[in-house]
Image: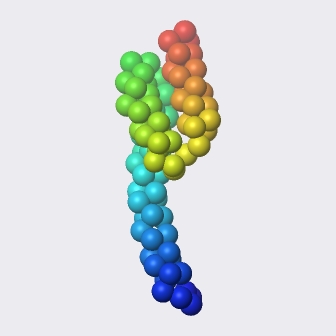
Amino acid sequence: MANTPQSAKRARQNAARFAVNKMRRSRIRTYLRKVEEALASGDQAVAAEALKNAQPELMRGVTKGVFHKNTASRKVSRLAARVKALATA
């Protein structure tokens, strides 16, 4: 429980920020899930399109402070490699 007006305000701000970040994380995970589903289906064109849509969302998460830059880059890189592997398989 907050003891001062300042700490009460900070608690409110943290709760609001948590809700926004939770929404952003959920949105990004949805895009990533779509890429995973496309990869599982084995359709390279659909997977490439899903990755093309997911990449800006991941990077937007970086600019908004939801993910670290390297984390997002790593995810994009690994997904891109898997999409590329579908083309050769």
Image location of residue 87, percent across then percent down = 50, 12
**Which residue corresponds to the image point at 46% horizontal and 79% vertical from the top-left?**
9
**Which residue corresponds to the image point at 58% horizontal and 25% vertical from the top-left?**
77
Tell me which colouring the rendered structure shows.
rainbow
The one of 3 and 46 positioned closer to us in this rendering: 3
Image location of residue 12, percent across then percent down = 44, 76
- Dividing the picture into quarters, in which one does residue 34 lie? top left
Q: Is residue 33 visible to the viewer in this orientation of the structure?
A: no
Judge whether 37 appears above or below 13 on screen.
Answer: above
Judge whether 18 appears above or below 31 on screen.
Answer: below
Quadrant where the N terminus lies?
A: bottom right
Image location of residue 68, percent across then percent down = 59, 43
The one of 33 and 64 positioned closer to us in this rendering: 64
Image location of residue 55, percent across then percent down = 45, 31
Judge whether 47 appears above or below 32 on screen.
Answer: above
**Which residue corresponds to the image point at 57% horizontal and 31% vertical from the top-left?**
73
Quadrant where the C terminus lies?
A: top right
